[in-house]
Amino acid sequence: MVTIAIASFIMILSVAVSSGFRKELRNGIASISGDIRLTSPDLNYINESSPIRSDASYMASLDSLEEISSIVPAIYRAGIVKNGGNIHGVLFKGTPDGGDSLQVSVPRRLADILGLNEGDGLTAYFVGEKVKARKFHVKSVYQDILGNDDKLVVYAGLSDLQRLNGWQSNEVSAIEIQLKDKYRSRDMMREMTQEVGARVLFNTPEDEDTVVASSALNMYPEIFSWLDLIDFNVLFVLILMTIVAGFNMISALLIMLFRNIPVIGLLKSLGMTDRSIASVFLRTSSSVVLKGMAAGNILAFLFCIIQNATHIIGLDPENYFVSFVPVNINVLQVLAADVVSYLVIMLLLLLPCLFISGVDPAKTVRAQ
């Protein structure tokens, strides 16, 4: 029972960590660029030459798609930030909820590099036809997902960057589309990118600028490949733990059968069939398996609750993109793992039950 509990704990924890990484990283990517992004074909982060309209004719068609969670206009602008003697290149991103009055949210990594805290001033320089300087105020510091020095994003107000670029209130760099969680698989993201691109193409009149649809799969292929690797490792752990638990139960059932050879012989002499006798031992084994799995599940749930609340187990964001082990309990995935592992273990337990057919009631009863 203890072995079953440990194996079940490891399996549920593996599923929870895999789901947690997928949720954290996909939400992080979506906050940076959206799941699907509409931009000008000649998008340029350096100057102000490639705006698109946030009130374009195709927007009504996109609003009717039930797979879409939100549609957010955004402005991107590369800049150089300076604090004291420290300088660093960053990407400014203006969003409607980014605030205004030159307030920004900076990533933790940039705050550490420049020595910034909430409330500090931040001078930024933007290169275009001429160099423009702006003095921002740090409203908040957020934990960045990507964590690379060359992919630091500073969030600002949409109106601030529109004034910086000299754009109208309906001119933006991109339209970011976020999908609902159940439509974020690789296949669905590709399908939705094609659907969005087709709707944009068919609903854009000749007098409006052309835009292109790109998927986060294409923008961040290394992250999605890393997530696929985690899923493969989780599958390997599930198979390994199920086999370990199964063979442990096989040895336990064999011991139970050896200790009860006289009983088996007696039951056979009374007319009980091999199948009926096997079902008695399988029911006992099933009870042990279910109790062990229940204990493992409870321990895994408690661990996930504690980890979510405290982030007690940390990670190096340089290697894992996040600073802590993310866990997410997906009830359907947990139930699927439990059901599959239970069925596999019970199927493995059919092997030692073959021993029952070899018991000769005449010999065992006479020996007794």
Image: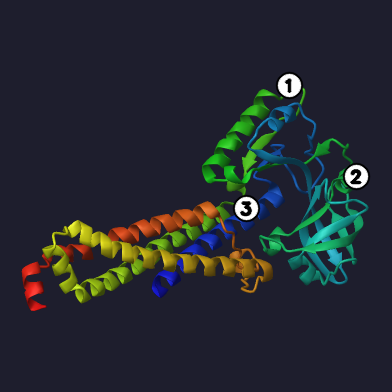
Q: Amino acid at mark 3?
A: Arg
Left-right relation of 367 to 231: left
Q: Earlier in the sequence, mark 3 or mark 2?
A: 3
Residue closest to the eye, 223 or 368: 368
Kindly identify the amino acid type of the residue bearing the numbered disc 1: Glu
Task: Examine the rendered structure and indicate whether residue 114 appears above or below residue 207.
Answer: below
Image location (x, y in percent) of residue 10: 47, 68
C-alpha gap between disc 1 and disc 2: 28 Å
Hey, which quadrant is residue 252 in on the image? bottom left
Residue drawn at the location 11% of the way across and 64% of the way down = 269
Report the side of 290 relative to 157 (left or right): left
Nearest the eye: 262 or 339: 262
Residue at 6% x, 69% y is 362
Is the Cβ of the residue at disc 1 closer than 8 Å to that at disc 3?
A: no
The amino acid pointed to by label 2 is Arg
Q: Which mark is residue 26?
A: 3
Q: Residue at x 61, y 55 (%)?
A: 23
Q: Is residue 349 visible?
A: no
Neighbour class for label 3 at 10 Å: few (<14), some, many (≥20)? many
Question: Which residue is at a point 22% across and 58% down the rendered structure image?
Answer: 276
Horizontal placement of 50 versus 353: left or right?
Answer: right
Residue 88's place in the image compared with 133, above or below, is below
User: What residue is shown with label 1?
Assistant: 206
Residue bearing mark 2: 163
At which x and y percent is residue 113?
A: 77, 70
Please state which of the two labelled residues, at mark 1 or mark 3, is closer to the viewer: 3
Q: Is residue 227 at all visible to an observer of this figure?
A: yes
Name above or below for residue 93 compared with residue 230.
above
Marks 1 and 3 sit apart, C-alpha to C-alpha, by 35 Å
Q: Secondary structure at mark 3?
A: helix
Instruction: Using the rendered view, name the quadrant where residue 177 is placed.
Output: top right
